[in-house]
Image (cartoon, rainbow, N blue to C red):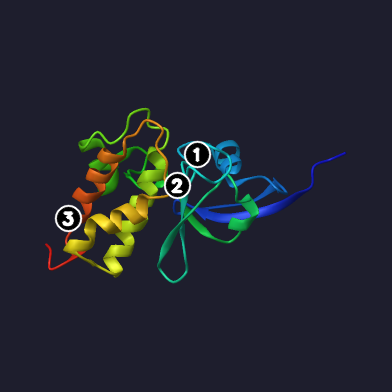
Amino acid sequence: MSIKTQPLSLTVNGQKVGPIAVPEGLMMIDFLHEYLNLTGSRLGCGQGVCHACVLIHDRADGTSEEIRTCITGAHFFGGKTIRTVEGLAKRNDKGEVVELSPVQQAFLTHYSFQCGYCTPGFVNAATVLVEKLKREPVEKDKVEETITEALNEHICRCTGYVRYFEAVKDVVLNTPGLVKGGK
């Protein structure tokens, strides 16, 4: 008996990938880890509950969304453009990180992690939120509610929520154009 495969092509962190023969039914988290050596997204619960595994799907209309990779098959992403936590920082020609994204830097500045297992999911969620707020700024009195809503589905077993929240709030309040009447 052989495993049935299908070709998969997509764009990951700005790079075209494929076509690669990928087993039917392979979850995206396994494709990222085993085929692309992108291990930043974490397999937490394996049931789509904790959101440690999310990546960013960049839609054709310029918007972005989080998608859980532990319950979404790799072939769902055929032809799509995605970003993983590894793709958020700026890199030089050698592939070395030269500058973290504002969200990643805020997480470091606020020491927004303990074990770090859920951190990639929180970073991706915050990145999607910042991108949304660039298009649709929020009233200053709605900032905390908006952040809570954006991070609400993410689970941290070490209870690092306060630091995650503070890091995201710092980015939102200090990035020009994200808050109506703000900077």
- Spatial distance from mark 3 to mark 1, Cα to Cα? 31 Å
Q: Element type at marker 2?
A: loop
Give x and y (percent) for residue 180: 17, 68
Residue 84, numbered circle: 2
Q: Which mark is residue 173?
A: 3
Q: In the image, is residue 56 above or below residue 45?
A: below
Q: Position of residue 85 (x, y in %)?
A: 41, 44
Whether residue 57 is situated above or below residue 109 in the rendered picture: below
Q: Amino acid at mark 3?
A: Leu
The crowd level at tag 3 (other Cα within 10 Å; few <14, some 14-19, many 20+) is: some
Mark 1 vs 2: CB contact within 8 A: yes
Residue at figure coordinates x 26%, y 40% from the top left: 162
Give the amino acid at mark 1. Leu
> In the rendered view, would you say 163 is above or below 173?
above
Give the distance between the C-alpha atoms of the residues marked 1 and 2, in whole angstroms. 8 Å
Q: Residue at x 32, y 43 (%)?
A: 92
Q: Residue at x 12, y 64 (%)?
A: 182
Which of disc 1 and disc 3 is earlier in sequence?
1
Horizontal side, residue 7 vs residue 117: left or right: right
